[in-house]
Amino acid sequence: MAYSQTQTMNPVINELEDVRADFVVKVYQHVLLAVGAFVAFETILFMTGIAEAFGEFVFGGGGITWLLILGGFMVGQFIVSQSVSNMDNPSVQYGGLFGSAALYSVLFAPMLWYAFRDGSQNVVMAAVVTAAGFAGLTVIGFVTRRDLSFMRPLIMWASFAAMGAIVISLFTSAQLGVWFSVAMIALSGASILYQTQNIVRRYPAWAHVAAAVGLFSSLMTMFYYVLRLFMNRN
């Protein structure tokens, strides 16, 4: 289904209140849909033994192996971002949403396999903390009247700096410890705040799937580092 650019590129913030409310509900419904797809993909990886084989491969392969995985993940996420930017094709946006869930399931598989070896307590606690944090940040993002657009360049700069730190740690003896996880959780929180406010300023009323992809990505990044933080306690 295609739409004309002149009809659809009006940001939802300029629509009537009931249209905005319907858009926001659909965005968060699709974030939950992506989370459900992630759980389904992850379950398949564990039930088939792929997660275990992947975990042993990653943790036994050293930094180069993990760098290759991160590189593949970044390429995949770039493809996803390009697909959801095509706002004239909702079908492609759904492909991007489920594609992002699949990519995160692969990225998480080694760490979840490692975490489940010692029981599920860390995973459950990380999921609860992430969900609570996401909910709280969402409320703040919607109720604050301050324009948070100034955060975008800061988030982009911090993201590149974090990626640089990860690459350096893979080739040197530098360790990304607890404080790096805390910093990445803070960065993910800032991204959620910015995106929560930005979705109604950027996306037209029918592009709720594309809007959900960015929020899902920030949610999963926060979960990754919250889980890493809990695992570092052991």
Image (tube, rainbow, N blue to C red):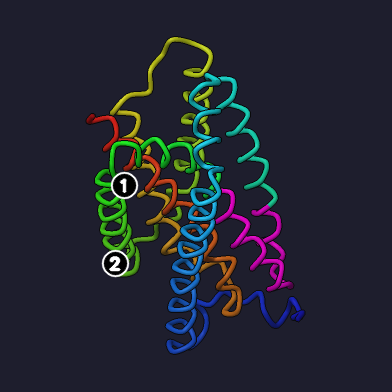
Camera-side residue of 192 and 26:
26
Q: Nearer the viewer, residue 212 or 36?
A: 36
Task: Identify the secondary structure beneath mark 1.
Answer: helix
- Asked which quadrant contains residue 133, the reply is bottom left
Instruction: Give the image quarter of residue 176.
Output: top left
Separation of disc 2 and disc 1 at Cα?
24 Å
**Vertical relation: 117 (above or below) 98:** above
Q: Position of residue 117 (x, y in %)?
A: 34, 37
Which image quarter holds the C terminus? top left
The residue at which mark 1 appears reads as 123
N-term mark: 2 or 1: 1
The reply to whether the magenta stretch includes residue 104 is: no
Kind of residue indicated by mark 1? Val
The residue lying at 58 percent from left, 53 percent from top is 102
Q: Residues within 10 Å of mark 1 (few under 14, many from 20)?
A: many
Is disc 2 in contact with disc 1, using a CB cutoff of under 8 Å?
no
Residue 89 is left or right of residue 229, and the answer is right
User: What number of labels is visible?
Assistant: 2
Residue 220 rendering spot, x and y as whole percentages:
44, 51
**Residue that mark 2 sits on:** 139
Q: Which residues are magenta?
A: 80-103
Residue 126 falls left or right of residue 67: left
In the drawing, does residue 112 fall left or right of residue 118? Answer: right
Report the amino acid beneath label 2. Val
Main structural element of the magenta stretch: helix, strand or loop?
A: helix
Magenta residue check for 87: yes
Q: Residue at x 46, y 81 (%)?
A: 20
Image coordinates for residue 18, horizontal then vertical, percent: 44, 89
Question: Could you tell me which residue is drawn at 53 percent across and 13 percent down?
Answer: 171
Q: Residues within 10 Å of mark 2 (few under 14, many from 20)?
A: few
Q: Quadrant of the N terminus?
A: bottom right
Residue 61, placed above or below residue 134:
above
